[in-house]
Image (cartoon, rainbow, N blue to C red):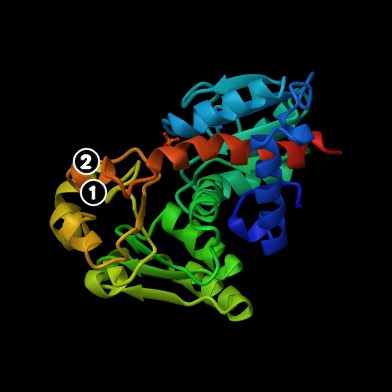
Amino acid sequence: MKKDLISISDLSGADIGEIFRSVREIKHKTGKARSVDAAKGKTLAVLFEKPSLRTRVSFSVAWAQMGGHVVYLAPGDIGLGERESVPDVARNLSRWVDAIAVRTYAQKTVEQLAQHATVPVINGLTDDEHPCQTLADFLTIEELLGTTQGIKIAFFGDGFNVCHSLLLTAAKLGTNLWVAGPKDYWPKKNYIERAKKDSEKTKASITVTADADEAAEGADVIYTDVWYSMGHEKEASKRRPLFKKYQVNSKLLAKAKPNVMVLHPLPAHRGEEITDDVLDGPNSVVLHQVENRLHVQKAILYKMVCKQ
Ligand code: CP
């Protein structure tokens, strides 16, 4: 694996397979990654420009369970790029900590941190990607469906960070991904192109459409995310009517396979992108997804920081 995990593009399909195998060892308590000593004497900096429940807690608990120490740097604590330049923060942190998990607005900020840090940098969400989330998502699908290859995932809503990472991961793992949303909110062209290029090798199909029904038809997995992410809250009233027909509700679920799995990275805006009955219903596996953030990040940390 590379020094940093900034994008799903930093991983090969084989790397992802290795992470999933490591998670199985962690869950069945057969591998070293579960050891309370794996991170003994090591410190993880959790440096976040945006709020977080799942990412902050799952990284912190993962590292604590491996015997390591966490330093949390909240939005505004260090004035990343304001009080001090990003390269200077990276150089300083590298003298004290063994790895940095980071959440920023701009992808460029994480790239700069990684470029100037001598320790591993792990992307805990940017405006462009959310690789740890997507790895937990595909792990969840593999655990519950037995495979991620050749199945149909239909994503509904905003072609933003989570959707970008889904595109890249689906292409690497041979998963057929449909993205349905208003045309003005489709994923960035370069993510669609990169996914389509990778999918040629794995025979996955990547389809972006405005037709919600076509995307839902026969889907094995239905995935949605908020219609306006952190930083886009002011656009809520403009976006709601545009995204309405992409809401994940019982009518949309009826077009998919009867046992379709419903995923959401959370937090959810209940009643907007997903209805209560679906989020809390029998097809929803969102809490399995949530738990897998912990296991997958433990495996990533073990491989990138502990296993030398
Ligand atoms: N899914 C996710 O990353 O949740 P948080 O924003 O709470 O970390």
Classify residue 205 as left or right of residue 46.
left
Q: Which x, y percent locates residue 256?
A: 29, 66
Q: Is residue 229 visible?
A: yes
Q: SS class of the residue under badge 2?
A: loop
Quadrant holding ligand 1?
Answer: top left
**Residue depicted at x 40% and y 44%:** 265
**Residue depicted at x 65% and y 49%:** 20
Q: Which x, y percent locates residue 5?
A: 65, 48
Q: Pointer 2 and pointer 1: residues touching (CB < 8 Å)?
A: yes
Q: Which x, y percent locates residue 28?
A: 67, 36
**Amino acid carrying mark 1 in the image:** Ile
Q: Quadrant of residue 209?
A: bottom left
**Amino acid carrying mark 2 in the image:** Arg
Question: Which label is found at residue 274?
Answer: 1
**Residue depicted at x 25% and y 67%:** 182
Eyeballing the image, is 276 above or below 41? below
